[in-house]
Amino acid sequence: MSSYKVMKTPGDTSWFLKDRFGMFIHFGLYAMPARHEWIKKLECTTEEHYDLYFKYFNPDLFDAKEWAKQAKAAGMKYAVLTAKHHEGFCLFDSKYTEYKVTNTPCGRDIVKEYADAFRAEGIRVGLYYSLLDWHHPEFTIDWMHPRRRDKDAEEQNKSRDIKKYAEYMRNQVTELLTNYGKIDILWFDFNYPNKPNVEGIYPPVTLKDWMVGKGEDAWESEKLISTIRTLQPDIIINNRTGIDQDIWTPEQSKPSEWVKHPETGELVPWECCQTFSGSWGYYRDEMSWKSDRMLIELLINAVSYGGNMIMNVGPTARGCFDERAENALLVYAKWMRFNGRSIYGCTMAEPEFKVPDGCKLTQSEDGKRIYIHLIEYPLNFLALEGFEDKIEYAQFLHDSSEILITKKRVKEMGDETGQEKEVIFLKIPSLQPKVTIPVIELFLK
Ligand code: GLC
């Protein structure tokens, strides 16, 4: 049993803390411009032009079963699909809006097909729901809104009532939690209650008081959350409504410690969310695709600090994954098939085991196995500290081939007393096995 005490939260995170690896899916109209899911805000796209995406949205190759198969092969145990992103377009047949997938040439309820297909593959089903909505007529224009530069924006706000929008969200979330079976995660995005630092904004904006952002008051987060808990009490809710719930979600970063609660300092359940290339929606011309090593390393890194990773795929407007995304998923499939044991049910290794240079450690739930991930492949030997007489047997994980353990008495560097100490070494084959990041499995006594 791990000695790390993870903060108790209202939902049931027991499965989440074991499953460790998920698939994020960002799909919406923005797949058509194919140059960022924030396109409407970034380019201040006119409503008239954005309507063309709605008019022609036709992901004719969409096959949720195919998505689910690829997620499963990659070793992903849960998924989160954007039921609605900031653009406001709904991938489900909601009775509270006409701005939905069933009114496009697509004509299918994508959320439904996704939920059925992923569940059938044994993958847990989550939904992302944007708190921002750049289409809803009651959503007031603020500094992030695509209409912020309209001459009459302030005027337009007079007829908008954010309370009505908050009610719309509760209604839609109720639909999502009633019509699609058990939902394991509700992933909200996001809170921005303060006036921004003008310097950081792109494209630049002249801030006016009426442009102020939105937070839990605008979303009526408390009511929203209690609606959810009444419908599906165990569901996992992320922390982006402005009210802490079950999981913390650092984005596109590589944490170097267990994520802590900002006020109490407790260790929290966390999930870092990552992309293959930078944007979340399909971005045709993006060149910043991560290397195979980076893909694997990000996952190992998260688990080595007691966290999860959810990796995003942005399907094309034809409704399928493009070749680059498929290849990236195959990188996981190949690695996870042989090394998944160092990820599922594992967590940060006990502090007594010192992390060797160039490595990352994880430890199994029962504490009996340690996994050494050779991020930088060592030359011939790997010295271990803190393991003394605790190891019974060692092997490579991918092929269960024995790794020999040797002990040497060595003098402490710079120690003038001439004292020797016993150091344990693993004998590492000089040729790196053909595994992106090889893992050594240690069986503890
Ligand atoms: C962000 C972005 C976004 C994406 C999300 C995922 O905050 O708004 O487009 O959906 O992060 O973490």
Image (cartoon, rainbow, N blue to C red):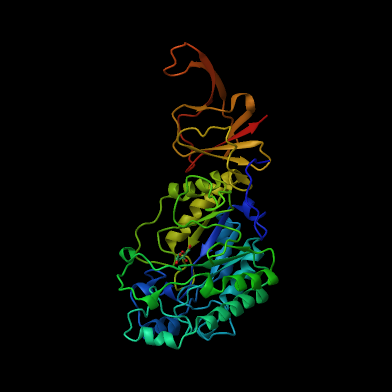
The x, y position of residue 51, in whole percent, is 41, 84
- Front position in the image: 263 or 16: 263
Look at the image and tell me whether residue 216 can be seen: yes
Q: Name the residue at 39% across, 81% down.
A: 50
Q: How many marks?
A: 0
Quarter holding the C terminus is top right
Residue situated furthest front in the rendering = 209
The x, y position of residue 270, in whole percent, is 56, 54
Residue situated furthest top in the rendering = 418
Quarter holding the N terminus is top right
Check the image and report above or below for 24 versus 97.
above
Q: Name the residue at 55% across, 78% down.
A: 166
Hey, which quadrant is residue 54 in on the image?
A: bottom left
Look at the image and tell me whether residue 40 can be seen: no
Q: Name the residue at 37% across, 69% down.
A: 35
Q: Name the residue at 43% across, 61% down.
A: 323
The x, y position of residue 342, in whole percent, is 59, 43
The x, y position of residue 273, in whole percent, is 49, 57
- Front position in the image: 107 or 150: 150
Check the image and report above or below for 348 versus 18.
above
Hey, which quadrant is residue 96 in on the image?
A: bottom right
Check the image and report above or below for 247 versus 110.
above
- Front position in the image: 400 or 265: 265
Q: Left or right of 410: which side holds 47?
A: left
Check the image and report above or below for 88 versus 372.
below
Hey, which quadrant is residue 414 in on the image?
A: top left
Q: Left or right of 233: which side holds 155?
A: left
